[in-house]
Amino acid sequence: MLKEERQAFIMRQINLHNKVLSTDLSTMLRISEDTVRRDLKEMAEEGKILKVHGGAIGRSFHHPFNTENMVYAQEAKQQIAEKTIRLLKNDMVVLTGGGTTMIELAKRIPENLRATFFTISPLVALQLVEHTHLTVISIGGQLSKSSNVHIGASVINQLADIKVDLCLLGANGFSVEEGMTDSDWEVVQVKRAMIRASKKLAILSIAEKLGSSQRMKVCDLNLIHYLITELPPENHLMSAYQQLDLELF
Amino acid sequence: MLKEERQAFIMRQINLHNKVLSTDLSTMLRISEDTVRRDLKEMAEEGKILKVHGGAIGRSFHHPFNTENMVYAQEAKQQIAEKTIRLLKNDMVVLTGGGTTMIELAKRIPENLRATFFTISPLVALQLVEHTHLTVISIGGQLSKSSNVHIGASVINQLADIKVDLCLLGANGFSVEEGMTDSDWEVVQVKRAMIRASKKLAILSIAEKLGSSQRMKVCDLNLIHYLITELPPENHLMSAYQQLDLELF
DNA sequence: CAATAACCTGCATTTTAATGCATACTGCTA
DNA sequence: TAGCAGTATGCATTAAAATGCAGGTTATTG
């Protein structure tokens, strides 16, 4: 294994967990701890990581988009990401929204997946483009201050021209009675256009949001093909959704 | 087997696996490792691949998000940012490229400036949108792995529809003889379209790059209205530019 | 403050790279 | 087609890089 591969792997681990232990790396990569230490030292000298006793930590403390430490319900979102990856196949064309869950997902996409991603979120785009075999296309437009995704008429126009295999959306409100709902009118318009542009629709949501609803309706539940939460599908909290015409993950 | 065939084969391998080992290639192609190395060296010099100890890796291979505190020549870039801010007035419409200098600038824009920014760089967009009174519009398109800006025909089409007051571009190569130059064909196309979409053009460049030139021409110096470096305009290193029909900062 | 884990330094070994040189091949021209 | 210049290839040698190990040193922890 090439040194560069190792270091990329380490970097990836750090981006994922924000820390690494020398011993873990030694085991995972099947190399001596000395080599691990030398890698860490080298990377630290290049300023890529912060070396500490026992391993290393990321520099994301200084990062302007501090999406690393403070993400609410990070554990759950990581699990959702892992499950969503199962829906992704080679040569798919995927359209994604924004949100922390989507960013977790973008980080965790397997390095060998070859696919095209459209996204309205610059943060998601930047994460996706780190993966060698992904083609990333930003749907540009006005950047919303509150949600950090592109909104507005131009986004909707661009979406009218594409048709993708799978749309991945985070949910703000989600209930059997009200369907999928959101609080921002502009965002709702964009989400609707995204759904129209897609053959299949997957909703990613932490279980906590199930049963809640917001003021504006995005779509009915019957438009949704997959519902992905951190809970196992048979969990009793999911009972309300087990009857519906959608696949639970 | 011809050299070109071999190198094409190597290129395919790299595109496929994003890396090659010299020993593997030697076995697969039934040639000596020396020849493999000479091929790799040649291809690396042409910038097609990145040669590393033990083989080579693809050019898009770079470490994610390392551009934070270790930005090259950060001091200078901050000074450039400070000077550029003087060009910005309320209610202006500005178009910006990407690059570390531009990000430094985006961070430093005064909080009370009220303006509209178009940009092809998601990183710049995310910095700009933190400022309360700025409207930020991403020009979307395919996200380039090497330069982290949007490129391609759709970008150029969108640029054809707008006209802005000021265009801010970083320079890759810049000299009296060759004008502004760059190394990436796609980026050149986008930069040209950006210049066409703007009434005034400001080039931001560290002094080190003055006098250098890359393979592809972006534009002549006479299209440039402002040249901003970290040096004072009267510095002797700037003498070549003091005569020209552009304003030095 | 003792036990343990992590760290650093120098060294030996192995792997990979670079260099100079001899040989072989290519595409010309007379 | 012989001769020739230029290039390509392989081999031998030397240089450099990477890796693991032994040992002594420094942090961390209870």
Image (spheres, coloured by chain):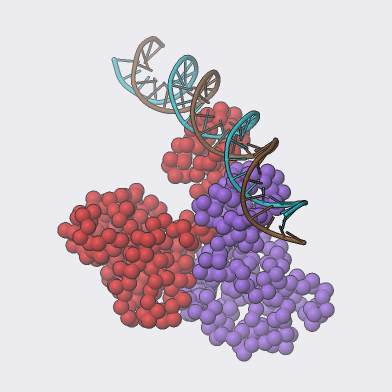
Chain colours: A purple, B red, C cyan, D brown
Q: Quadrant of residue A115?
A: bottom right
Extreme left residue here? B243
Q: Nearer the viewer, residue A230 or A221?
A: A230
Residue B40 percent across, percent down from the top left: 50, 37
Residue A224 relative to residue B231: left or right: right
Residue B148 percent across, percent down from the top left: 47, 60
Residue B68 percent across, percent down from the top left: 48, 61
Residue B18 percent across, percent down from the top left: 57, 47
Q: Nearer the viewer, residue B127 or A245?
A: B127
Residue B206 relative to residue B55: left or right: left
Residue drawn at x 53%, y 83% is A186
Q: Is residue B246 above or below residue D20?
A: below
Task: Assign the C terminus of chain B to one quadrant of the image.
Answer: bottom left
Q: Quadrant of residue B194?
A: bottom left
Residue A237 relative to residue D4: left or right: right
Residue drawn at x 54%, y 45% is B57
Q: Quadrant of residue B100?
A: bottom left
